């Protein structure tokens, strides 16, 4: 089952067992980094629930009608999900299914729900109709309220392996990039495709690596401003910048070069584990803020300044 989805064996097994046993939860929360198959599997899961063969066969009448019935809704928000958006869903969900035995709602980028929207959805999670299944898909689990998390089955999606990323390219009929580029995608097929297609990525990465190296070595305001300028120049690619930064912090803590994420460069920077952990915390906080559409300039400058301060504390100690 779910052959169309690459990797993610454990999520597949959990969902296959639920369908096979007929013991479906009213709510699932798919979480993990972007580009690892969460939305694809959520849709295949929804298809399998209504499929006459419980396999998303694509040929039965239920599969043929999957995208044309009000019993199934795939919600892909462009910006935030407001309380009125959720109230529209909750008003519909208590109406019995028209074609199928179930009504299924898949909400991608669920972390874009406002707090008020999540509280409105909570009412459904607490008293769901027997025929309803809601799947929340998120790359930012920390943005989902604990009260929502506690009432759904949480399923973690792992980064894809190099072999699985290569299979993604093969299935799309695209040339398979070298391992060095694929390793920089950090297990995300979306990121791997973007890297392979971006002519400017190599230059951007080289600039960022050079400037992060200078920050780690010199630890002055000048290096903070230089990195801040990089983040402004490549603002549209901030997630890629974040991933590069995060991977270099990791590489600064390993003693065996073969374990580094950036195997194509010589990264001769070493950080104590405590300092690295503090930097990780700053980067995680920055990602949460930017993912929630926080003030970009202030968020980046504050994070970089704090990282410089952590580096200097290490030097003093």
Image (cartoon, grey):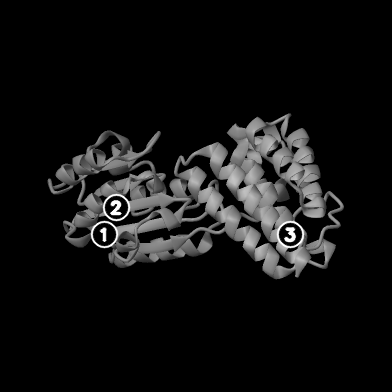
Whether 311 is drawn above or below 47: the answer is below
Distance, label 2 to label 1, CA atoms, is 6 Å
Is label 2 in contact with label 3 (beta carbons under 8 Å)?
A: no
Q: Which residue is mark 3?
A: 312
Q: Nearer the viewer, mark 3 or mark 1?
A: 3
Q: Which residue is mark 2?
A: 134
Residue 62 point in image, percent of width and height: 28, 43
On the rendered structure, is 177 left or right of 136? right
- Please provide percent x and percent y for residue 229: 69, 35
The front one of 161 and 64 is: 161
Q: Quadrant of the C terminus?
A: bottom right
Instruction: Determine the secondary structure under disc 3.
Output: helix
Instruction: Note whether residue 48 is visible.
Output: no
Q: Which mark is residue 26?
A: 1
Label 1: element kind:
loop
Pointer 2 local density, CA inside 10 Å: few below 14, some 14–19, many at least 20: many
Residue at point 78%, 43% (across, down): 211
* Mark closer to the chain start, 2 or 1: 1
Give the position of the N terminus as an image quadrant.
bottom left
Residues at discs 2 and 1 in contact (Cβ within 8 Å): yes
Please tell me how crowded label 3 is: few (under 14), some (14-19), or many (20+) other residues with Cα within 10 Å: some
């Amino acid at each position: 089952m779910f052959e169309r989805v690459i990797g993610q064996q454990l999520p597949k097994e959990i969902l296959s067992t639920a369908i096979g046993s007929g013991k479906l939860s009213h709510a699932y929360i798919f979480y993990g980094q972007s580009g690892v198959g969460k939305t694809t599997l959520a849709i295949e899961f929804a298809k399998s629930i209504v499929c006459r063969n419980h396999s998303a066969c694509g040929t039965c009448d239920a599969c043929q009608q999957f995208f044309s019935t009000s019993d199934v809704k795939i919600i892909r928000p462009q910006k935030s999900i407001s309380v009125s958006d959720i109230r529209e869903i909750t008003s519909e969900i208590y109406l019995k299914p028209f074609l199928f035995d179930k009504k299924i709602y898949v909400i991608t980028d669920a972390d874009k729900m406002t707090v008020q929207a999540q509280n409105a959805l909570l009412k459904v999670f607490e008293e769901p109709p027997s025929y309803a299944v809601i799947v929340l898909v998120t790359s930012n689990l920390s943005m989902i309220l604990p009260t929502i998390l506690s009432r759904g089955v949480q399923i973690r999606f792992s980064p894809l392996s190099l072999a699985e990323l290569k299979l993604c390219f093969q299935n799309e009929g695209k040339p398979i990039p070298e391992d060095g580029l694929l390793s920089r995608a950090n297990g995300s097929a979306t990121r791997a495709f973007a890297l392979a297609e971006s002519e400017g990525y190599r230059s951007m990465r080289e600039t960022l690596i050079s400037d992060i190296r200078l920050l780690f070595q010199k630890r002055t305001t000048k290096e903070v401003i230089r990195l801040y300028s990089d983040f402004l120049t490549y603002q549209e690619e901030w997630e890629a910048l974040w991933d590069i930064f995060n991977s270099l912090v990791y590489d600064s803590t390993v003693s065996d070069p073969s374990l580094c994420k950036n195997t194509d460069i010589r990264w001769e920077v070493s950080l104590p584990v405590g300092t690295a952990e503090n930097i990780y915390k700053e980067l995680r906080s920055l990602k949460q803020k930017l993912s929630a559409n926080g003030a970009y300039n202030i968020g980046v400058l504050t994070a970089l300044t704090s990282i410089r301060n952590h580096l200097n504390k290490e030097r003093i100690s």
